[in-house]
Amino acid sequence: MHHIVIDARVSNNPNGEHINQFLDQLQVVDKNNKYTILVKNTDKNHWEPTAVNFSVKSVSFNQSFFNEQFSLKRLLDSLSPDLVHFCTLKQPILYKGRHITTLYDLIDIPGLSQLKPSYLHQFINKHIFKNTISSSKYIIVSNSYIKKELLKIIKTPVDTIAVIPFEIGVPSKTSVNFWHQTALQTHSVYIDAIRDHVRI
């Protein structure tokens, strides 16, 4: 039996519907391994496990740079997992354990995002992003377009990026779809029902 930690602190965010469905289905197919699901303290009742090999651990620290780099690393070291699944690019660069990363869209990728943070913010983001990509055993993306764009700006073996469409799964439990993705030949368009902009 292996101990797997899933960093689901963004499970109550717009992208979180896919994380919740992933966790629901994972409980059905894996009865052997031990899972610890990390959620924000404010979201500790947002997702509740039904399988005995799943447990939820709430974290009280905020999603800031220093908390990501130090508090989260300290927590992961104390849990001593065999694998960590990060559902966000925000992860401790000094964490040396085996891990994989899910990349939901292009907006958080330095160089592709239309957001214009400060120079220092850009420098830090690029450093964390490069470390995340190079240190992750696998990167999971939702379509081939994101994989192609990712390979343009990073040097990583093609087979380390796995394309898994997030639409494949059970119907949403909520009446509002958090976001819908339409993949075209040259564009990837995201319509976000929570925020008032379209992410391209």
Image (cartoon, rainbow, N blue to C red):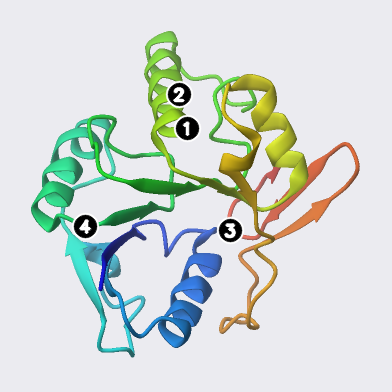
In the rendered view, tell whether residue 145 sits above or below residue 169.
Answer: above
Whether label 1 touches label 4, CB < 8 Å: no
Dot 3 and dot 4 residues touching (CB under 8 Å):
no
Q: Which residue is mark 3?
A: 194
Q: Position of residue 164 (x, y in %)?
A: 65, 58
Report the Cα–Cα distance between label 2 and label 1.
Answer: 5 Å
Q: Can you tell which quarter of the image residue 83 is in?
A: bottom left
Q: CA distance from mark 1 to mark 4?
A: 20 Å
Frontmost of labels 4 and 2 is 4
Give the residue drawn at x 32%, y 53%.
84
Describe the element under mark 4 as helix, strand or loop: loop
The Cα–Cα distance between marks 3 and 1, rounded to whole angstroms, is 28 Å
Q: Which mark is residue 133?
A: 1
Q: Dot 4, crowdedness within 10 Å: few (<14), some or many (≥20)?
A: some
Counting other residues with Cα less than 10 Å from the Cα at mark 1, is it few (<14), some (14-19), or many (20 or more)?
A: many
Query: How many callouts does the rendering have?
Result: 4
Residue 188 left/right relative to 105: right
Within 10 angstroms of label 3, few (less than 14), some, or many (20 or more) residues? few
The first of marks 1 and 4 along the sequence is 4
Give the label on residue 130, or none.
2
Q: Nearer the viewer, residue 191 or 142?
A: 142
Q: Which comes before the other along the chain, label 3 or label 4?
A: 4
What amino acid type is highlighted by mark number 1? Ile
Identify residue for label 4: 81
Q: In this rendering, which labeled residue sits more in front, label 3 or label 4?
A: 4
Lower position in the chain sequence, tag 3 or tag 2: 2
Image quarter in which the C terminus is found = top right
The amino acid type, in three-letter code, at marker 3 is: Ile
Residue 193 percent across, percent down from the top left: 65, 60
Callout 2: SS: helix
